[in-house]
Image (tube, rainbow, N blue to C red):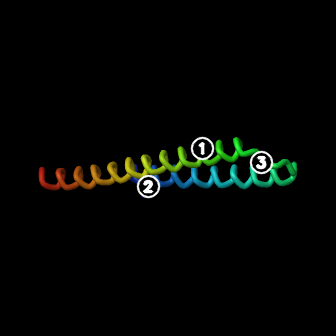
Amino acid sequence: MKRSNSDVYISVLSEMTSASRCAANSYKRNSRSAEKPLHSSSTMNLAKEKEELQHLNDRFATYINKVKSLEEENKRLKKNAR
C-alpha cells in the first residue's frame, strides 16, 4: 500500500517528536547525575528554545494541514476532469 505524502509528513513529525523527547529525557538524566544547579540563564534559554520549537511545530502542523487540503482538492479536480 502506497503511503500518501501526509502520512509521510506525520511519520516524520512523529519521529521528530520522539527524538526530541529522548533528547529531553537524556538531558534531564545528565543534569541530575551531574548535580549541577541550573542557572537562570540556562532556564531562560531552555524556555526560549521550547517556545521556538512550539512555534515551528505549529507552523509544521499548519503546513501539513495545507498539504492535506491541497491533496483533497487535487482528488476532487481529477474526479471532475474525467
**Rendered location of residue 19, percent (x, y):** 64, 50
Q: Nearer the viewer, mark 1 or mark 2?
A: 1
Q: What element carries label 1?
A: helix
Q: Is 67 or 42 nearer to us in this picture? A: 42
Q: Mark 1 sits on what residue?
A: 49
Question: In whole angstroms, how far apart are the C-alphas of marks 2 and 3?
Answer: 39 Å
Q: Mark 3 sits on what residue?
A: 38
Q: Mark 2 sits on what residue?
A: 7
Q: What element carries label 2?
A: helix
Q: Nearer the viewer, mark 2 or mark 3?
A: 3
- The outermost residue toward the right is 34
Q: Is mark 3 on a helix, strand or loop?
A: loop
Question: In whole angstroms, how far apart are the C-alphas of marks 1 and 3?
Answer: 15 Å
Question: In whole angstroms, how far apart are the C-alphas of marks 1 and 2?
Answer: 27 Å
Please give the name of the residue rendered at 62% of the width and 55% of the height, measured from the top-left corner: 18
Using a 10 Å C-alpha cutoff, classify the residue at mark 1 as few (fewer than 14 neighbours), some (14 to 19) or many (20 or more): few
Residue type marked 2: Asp
Residue 72 - label: none
Residue type marked 1: Glu
